[in-house]
Image (cartoon, rainbow, N blue to C red):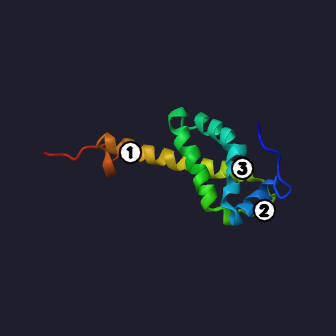
Amino acid sequence: MEAPPEAGDVTDDAELVAASLREPHRFALVYDRYFDDIHRYLAARPGREDADDLAAETFLIAFRRRADFDASRGGAVRPWLYGIATNLVSQHRRTEQRGGVAARGGGGHHGRRARTS
């Protein structure tokens, strides 16, 4: 059973992010509220095998950048988190593509081998 909120508890997302600047442990509530949604989103993109790492990285980036959160843009944390997650998916795909080319021996030659004759 969850403890009842205390009088000074912040429940609005934007206020919660702001409060986490003074009391970093409050960011755990953002994590608790949105982790499952972000994880499902990521599991549907690059796949389940990468979703755990990318979801964790999403919240780590959000925590580190929480001072940059712009509450004047609607104050919604969910779109901010989805934006971070989407950027990570794009970065992940680029990294995989580069790794795939290198693994095939393509390097900077687009998979063509140099002529030896």
Q: Amino acid at mark 2?
A: Ala
Q: Which residue is mark 3?
A: 29
Q: Earlier in the sequence, mark 1 or mark 2?
A: 2
Q: Residue at x 82, y 52 (%)?
A: 11
Question: Where is residue 110 shown, x and y percent of the image?
Answer: 35, 46
Comparing 38 with 2, the one in front is: 2
How much space separates mark 3 and mark 2, taking CA atoms?
17 Å
Q: Amino acid at mark 3?
A: Leu
Please state, as top left, top right, bottom left or bottom right, where the N terminus lies in the image.
top right
- Mark 1 → mark 3, Cα distance in angstroms: 36 Å
- Mark 1 vs mark 2, CA separation in Å: 38 Å
Binning the other alpha carbons within 10 Å of mark 3 as few (below 14), some (14 to 19) or many (20 upward) gives: some
Q: Secondary structure at mark 1?
A: helix
- SS at badge 3: helix
Residue positioned 36% across, 43% down in the render: 101
Is the residue under label 3 in contact with that under label 1 (CB below 8 Å)? no
- Between tags 1 and 3, which lies in front? 3
Amino acid found under the numbered disc labelled 1: Gly
